[in-house]
Amino acid sequence: MNYYIDRKRMGIAEIFSGMHPIFSPSNDMNAKDTVRLMCEQSFRTRAKIASGINRAISKLTKESTVDVEEYLNDDIKNLSENPVRADNLNDLLPFMKWLEELHRVNSLAVERSQYSLNDAANYMERAAGELLRSCSTNMMWQNISLVQEEGGLLLNLTERFWGKAALYFPDVSTTFEGTFPLVGMLFCIEAEHTDAGFEFSFVVNVEFGTDDMELRAIQNRNWVRLTFKCSRPEMRLSLFDYGGYLRDFGKCGHGFIEDWCGEAISKEQFLGSASMSEKEQELLPLAKILRVTYQMADVEMYGDGEHSPSEIAIPNKVLELLGNRYRFGLYEEIFKETGQQALYDQLKKAVDAWVEDDLDAIADGLWNFARMLREKEREDSVREFYDRLIHRMLECTSEFDGVSRIYGTYSEAEEKMRSVIEPKLLENGFTGSYPHYRRRRGKKGEYISVLTSNVNKRTVNGVMTYYFSLSAAVKRLERRGKRKTAEYFAAGVPFESTTAEDCAIAYNKYTKYTELGGAYDDESAEININIFDGVSEENQTADTANDLLKYVNVALDAFKGKAMPRWYRKKRRQSSVRYKNEITTGGTLLKYLPFGMYIAALLMGIYVVCNRFFDVSQYIPHSDARTALVAALLVGVAIALICTVLRMRSLRRHIWRY
């Protein structure tokens, strides 16, 4: 078969591409313009460029484990003897021409390899072909294993949250003299279809080391090329109920939907649409739209003020989805039945803008949809729509009955965490069951939820680590019905159906929410489970489950109005995450400035009224109209400043994010 991908040439290109995008294939300028642009930079920038190029060339020429001399011309070898300096970047034109040619040859090789692989995939079952294409584009430097099975070879890919996939190659004929299983990092797959069947070539790095991937690619050691012929490949797939996993992990509302959308998109990118259920395919376009609009809303909420949500690059696949007017017509039902027709109308504007081929109008339409969605989340008026959507998402995945080897031990971790947390909460009057607990005190509902991260890890020796955090919230309750039969509700939802996560987005003056001990604080409680032996004594010593109990105590004190303890206040000061624009000093000042101006206007009105009945200057010297106006404005600004200081001090003393 033909081999198109040259590993070392690709590795050389990766070494330079990792320095800066200007050295990557995405740079569409020619060599001359690139050198001119580098020379126009500041001395400090030019010095960094020179230093980076020298380091890269040193890897190619002076690393003892590397042999790439055949790829280097005399100009490159000369640069290794005479390092680049910030004041002689003009001399880099030969180097940039060499790099430009390297990228061109690599691009042509990848194109030919992909064409051959796509041709082979067309003769396979659709699902297997789509997985093979995904492996060739998304699996570089991913863990794989190749094992002998039933007279063929089985390619096992890393298990994902949504499932695990493998390709089976039957009737294998090969001259490979190595041993199986073959475990390592996949670099590339090449494939070819002939009248006699299929031929494959896998390039795998089998090193157990810490070298950079780019450096590994240009080394001679620890590389295996497995070439074989086989009959028609098959896909073996086990799908997991990832919607059920997210629910078990404590995800609700906005958090559930955002994570579900991410998992569904990942699954489609990896497996292709052929391996997704009909119900998943129905919701996938809306999932992609929600993913983009959530990103836009997050830029508005957490952004630095330098970027507009409309500047977010809209993926081409999302643009293609907007062209499917029939699909979006089906979504209108769920929006309309849940009273969100106005929300759908904003999305419809983006669809209509696609017909006009107006990219700016598409971005504006999606941004307006994102802004209205976020506003409705704050008002807690989108709950019914979210509940209906979550119900459909759970239906999409409930039919998958595959058993996850990685997450199969979660019940043990859950039981361990429950034994740590639940007695403390029940002792303090909370009701409910893991992972959501609640209690009512007066007109307030107080909520605590235990959250499990869906990004956990497994070590090579089979130990699975689960990361836990805590969310806490307070919400004012509404009382309905006669005194004896009165029930308490949170925004129209029975108290027993509300969780802390329901309050995460719907923040207002009646709602407080925070997450403790999670990603926001760079610290999570950990439980380690051996997937073969369960909770062993060795793993138990490494558990930090009890650390989450100290966050429970912080939350319980906060419910009583107490300030956070000193150790936790220090942790919050060190956190680099900004949770809401209002928390900044400037944003808080702007919030209270109108109130200060209202007081200023009130004082000025009092002065005018008093001056009509008597001469104010007799009692307050030099109190003419101009002086009174200036004094009133100063008082208003002072009040705004005082309110800002008190607000910021309050935020720094209490755990609540909002």
Image (cartoon, rainbow, N blue to C red):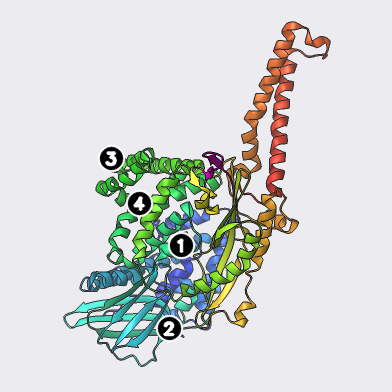
Count of labels in the image? 4
Disc 3 and disc 2 in contact, CB within 8 angstroms:
no
Numbered disc in front, either 4 or 1: 1
- Mark 3 closeness class: few <14, some 14–19, many ≥20 residues within 10 Å: few
* Mark 4 to mark 1 CA distance (whole Å): 19 Å
Relative image position of residue 163 (x, y in whole percent): 39, 70
Distance, label 2 to label 1, CA atoms, is 30 Å
Q: CA distance from mark 4 to mark 2?
A: 38 Å
Asked if disc 4 and disc 1 are in contact, CB closer than 8 Å, the reply is: no
Q: Earlier in the sequence, mark 4 or mark 1?
A: 1
The answer to whether any part of residue 308 appears in the image is no
Frontmost of labels 2 and 1 is 1
For the residue pair 258 and 233, the one nearer the viewer reads as 258
Residue type at the position of mark 1:
Leu
Residue 463 placement, left or right of 118: right
Helix, strand or loop for disc 1: helix
Which badge, 2 or 1, comes first in the chain's sequence? 2
Q: Position of residue 359 (x, y in %)?
A: 35, 43
**Circle nearer the viewer, 4 or 2:** 4
Residue linked to disc 3: 356
Q: Is residue 483 within the magenta segment?
A: yes
Say what secondary structure mark 2 lies in: strand
Question: Quarter-wise, where is residue 516 in the image?
Answer: bottom right
